[in-house]
Amino acid sequence: MRAIVLESYGGPEVLTVQEVPDPVPGPEEVLVAITGSAVNRADVLQRMGLYPGPPGEHEIPGLEFAGRVTAVGARVTAWAEGDAVMGIVGGGAYAERLCVHERQVLPVPSELGLADAAAVPEVFLTAYDALVVQGGLTSGRTALVHAGASGVGTASIQLARAIGARIIVTTSTGKVEACRALGADLVVDYTRDDFVEAVEAFTGGEGVDVVLDVIGGDYVDRNLRCARVTGRVIQVGLMGSGVANVSVGMLLAKRIQLIGTVLRARPLEAKIAATQRFRSEVLPRFVDGSLRPVIDSRYALAAVADAHRRMEANENVGKLLLDV
C-alpha cells in the first residue's frame, strides 16, 4: 500500500509517499481501506521530531481516518466488510489501509457522507472530551476557547451551541467573521484586543466556567484570570511555549482545576471509552444536522506537504483533508 513514511524529521519536504506492506488485522481489529484522513497539529509536531508516534516498523503519521471495512479479525462482531467507518488512532492514517480495534471505530452517518467523515473524529472528540466530559460544560454555562477557527475551535463552537452553552473564542483578524458565522457568542481578535478584558466584560466580571486552550505559554496565567471561581482550564495543546509562569495564589484562591489532557497517549480502554461515549452522545447530532465538519481545503495524499505548510502558516479555517 501507499503511505507517508517519516524516515527523518524536519520540514514538510520530509513527507514522502512510499510503498509498505499491507497491515494485517488482529483478532479484535478491522482492516479499513482509507478514503480520507486529515492534518492535525500533532502531525506537524511529529514531522518535526517533537511528538513521536507509536512504535512500529514504519513511522506513519495520521490521527484520524474514514473509509470502508475490508476485512475483520476472528473475534470481531460489530462490523462487516463494506461498512463505512471513521475513527481516531495513535498514528498510521496517512496511508491507504489501517488496522484498528473494532471498538475504536465509529459508523459514518449517511447524512454526513464518507467524503467528509475524516474531518470529524479528532477535533469533535477532542472538543467534546475537553469541554463536556472534563470541563463540565452544560446548558447555561460559558466556555472560552482559543484558536476558534481551528478544527477544534470550529467543533467547539458548534458543540457549545448544540448543548445550549455560551462560547467566547479568540482568533486572528481574518477569521473573525468565520467564527461569528458558526455561532460564537463573542469573538475576540487577539491581534487587537485583550481577551482577559473581553471575557470580564462579557461575563460581568464572573469569568467563564471552562477554558479550552491549545496555546500554552503566557496564555495559561491569563486563562486563570478568565476562569470563574471553581472553573476549569483544560490544556489540550501547546502551539506556544510549553513553559508558563502561573499565579498559584490565584489558582488556590479561585479553586480552579488546571487539567492537562491528550487523547493519543491514553491506554486502549480509555480511548475506547471516549469513542463509545462520543458515539452515543454526539454522533446523533450529525444525523439531525446540528453538527457538521468545517472543511478548509482538500489535498491528495502525495500533496500532504502543502497541507502542512498551510497549517503552519495558520491560514486554514477548519480542517485540512487528505483524499487518499
Image (cartoon, rainbow, N blue to C red):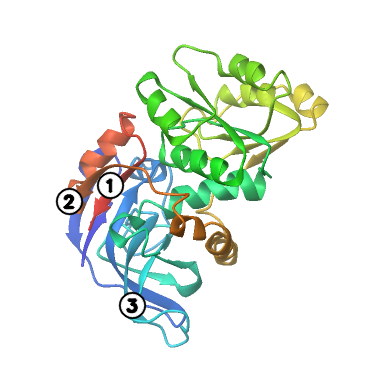
* The one of 250 and 119 positioned closer to us in this rendering: 119
Query: For the residues marked 3 and 1, what is the alpha-carbon distance in whole angstroms?
Result: 25 Å
Which disc number belongs to residue 52?
none
Could you tell me the amino acid type at mark 1? Ser
Which disc number belongs to residue 8?
1
* Label 2 element class: helix
Where does the N terminus fall, quadrant-wise?
bottom left
* Label 1 element class: loop
In this figure, which residue is indicated by the disc labeled 3?
Answer: 24
In-image side of 189 versus 138 (left or right): left
**Does any portion of residue 92 appear in the rendered image?**
no
Could you tell me the amino acid type at mark 2? Ala
Query: For the residues marked 2 and 3, what is the alpha-carbon distance in whole angstroms?
Result: 24 Å
The residue positioned 39% from the left and 76% from the top of the image is 30
**Dot 2, how many residues are within 10 Å of its Cα: few (below 14), some (14-19), or many (20+)?**
some
* The one of 149 and 100 positioned closer to us in this rendering: 149
Where does the C terminus fall, quadrant-wise?
bottom left
The residue positioned 46% from the left and 31% from the top of the image is 147
In this figure, which residue is indicated by the disc labeled 2?
Answer: 302
> Looking at the picture, does residue 285 appear above or below residue 237?
below
**Dot 3, how many residues are within 10 Å of its Cα: few (below 14), some (14-19), or many (20+)?**
some
Q: Earlier in the sequence, mark 2 or mark 3?
A: 3
Residue, far bottom: 74
Depth-wise, is mark 2 or mark 1 nearer the camera? Answer: 2
